Amino acid sequence: MKKRIAVPSIAPGGLDAQCSEHFGHCEVFTLVDVEDSDIKEVSILENGKHQHGGCLRPVETLLMKGVQAVVAGGMGLNPLRGFRAAGIDVFVGKGTTVKEMVDSYLSGEARLMTDNHVCGCCGH
């Protein structure tokens, strides 16, 4: 089964890129297309400047790019709710690089993000 996964990361992106610690302020999203647990393609999508109250813009952007799952270290409640409403699953991954985060998703180690995982910073 094919799936497109997005990981918030630090430019230039790619599998060896470091994951961004703050979803809304990430420089890029590394988009990873997988099929049957194999990585097929990797692409980079720049994240626009984060503005107060602009937490849902990445949700809309990733939805338009066909993303079906996001693997992150955490995020605020507003984008989490936005992803839920859009039908995009959000997972708390394990690792510091994009590849490690994707591997944690593919192996089943990443867990579905709940309200208890959300970031309390920046007014979220």
Image (cartoon, rainbow, N blue to C red):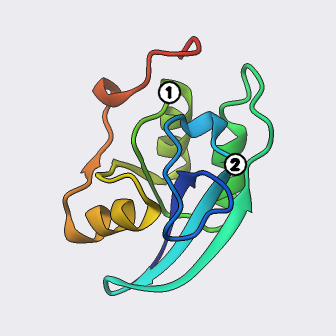
Numbered circle sitting on residue 110:
none
Q: In which image quadrant can residue 102 be found? A: bottom left
User: At 20% across and 64% down in the image, what residue appears?
Assistant: 108
Residue type, numbered disc 2: Glu
- Label 1: which residue? 76
- Label 2: which residue? 60
Q: Is residue 102 above or below residue 18?
A: below
- Residue 18 at x, y percent in the picture: 50, 54
Disc 1 crowd rating (10 Å Cα; few below 14, some 14-19, many 20+) is many
- Residue 65 at x, y percent in the picture: 68, 66
Q: Is residue 121 above or below residue 117?
A: above
Depth check, front residue: 8 or 58: 8
Q: Is residue 11 above or below residue 119?
A: below
Q: At numbered mark 1, what does the secondary structure look like: helix, strand or loop?
A: loop
Residue type, numbered disc 1: Gly
User: At 49% across and 37% down in the image, what residue appears?
Assistant: 21
Disc 2 crowd rating (10 Å Cα; few below 14, some 14-19, many 20+) is some
Depth check, front residue: 72 or 85: 72
Q: At numbered mark 2, what does the secondary structure look like: helix, strand or loop?
A: helix
User: At 50% across and 27% down in the image, what residue appears?
Assistant: 76
Q: Is residue 62 above or below residue 73?
A: below
> Label 1 to label 2, Cα distance in Å?
15 Å
Q: Left of 107 or right of it: where is 21?
A: right
- Residue 79 at x, y percent in the picture: 56, 34
Q: Left of 91 or right of it: where is 48?
A: right
- Who comes first in sequence, dot 1 or dot 2? 2
Q: Left of 54 or right of it: where is 33?
A: left
